[in-house]
Amino acid sequence: MAKEEILIKGDVYWCNNYERNAKSRKYQIDLCNLSADAVQALARIGIEAKRDDAKKPAQGFYITCKSAGYVINTYDKTGKELGEWVKIDKGTEVKRDEQGKALYTRVSNGSKALATISPYETTVNGQRYTQGSIKKIVITDLIEYNPQGMDVSKMEEEAL
């Protein structure tokens, strides 16, 4: 029997799609500000959306999707993948240039996305639960993360 998949839209936060998260050591993406319909659809396939207004007030209902060994292939609206990767012994990893720089577009908090999600069972600290797996994610409104500098022209446009 095939796993059920659903298509949801949301805001991307803490995008570690081509490089592992420092804390979890996994590739992961938070899909946030999910609609009531998305939360209900996720619940129907066994995935519980979380909400933490005290710690994450800007994120509304959200899910965290993780991958232990494989990058989370991420695409733009034209279908172009936002990163390059290579197959390794047990999974995939981001491709790097001669200087060791990772070859991918960094997705910043607040970017908009469409994602196909399916459930999978996992065990954490001896407790079993259902988590979401991203089968495909398309960034529909990209805010590119640029840690080296700021885009002053964009800041000027957005300033009150």
Image (spheres, helix red, strand yellow):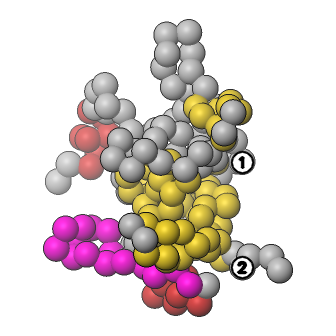
Mark 1 crowdedness (10 Å alpha carbons): few <14, some 14-19, many ≥20: few
Does residue 159 sit above or below 101 in this rendering? below
Q: Which residues are magenta?
A: 46-60
Q: According to the image, label 2 marks what residue?
A: 4
**Quarter of the figure with residue 119:** bottom right
Residue 132 position, x and y percent, is 55, 69
**Quarter of the figure with residue 63:** bottom left
Mark 1 vs mark 2, CA separation in Å? 23 Å
| Front position in the image: 45 or 75 | 45
| Front position in the image: 159 or 9 | 9
35 relative to 82 in the view: left or right: left
Residue 118 position, x and y percent, is 64, 72
Mark 2 crowdedness (10 Å alpha carbons): few <14, some 14-19, many ≥20: few
Residue 90 tag number: none
Is label 1 in contact with label 2 (beta carbons under 8 Å)?
no
- Asked if residue 49 is among those painted magenta in the image, a careful observer would answer yes
Residue 79 tag number: 1
Given the image, on which type of amino acid does mark 2 rest? Glu
The mark that comes first in sequence, 1 or 2, is: 2
Specify the principal SS of the magenta part: loop
Question: Quick one: quadrant of the C terminus?
Answer: bottom left
Residue, x 23% and y 71% (percent of image)?
57
| Front position in the image: 96 or 70 | 70
Question: Quick one: quadrant of the N terminus?
Answer: bottom right
Instruction: Say if residue 85 shows up in the picture.
Output: yes
Residue, x 25% and y 75% (percent of image)?
52
Given the image, on which type of amino acid does mark 1 rest? Gly
Residue furthest to the top in view is 98
Instruction: Say if residue 38 shows up in the picture.
Output: no
Does residue 138 sit above or below 48 in this rendering? above
57 relative to 65 in the view: left or right: left
Residue, x 72% and y 48% (percent of image)?
79
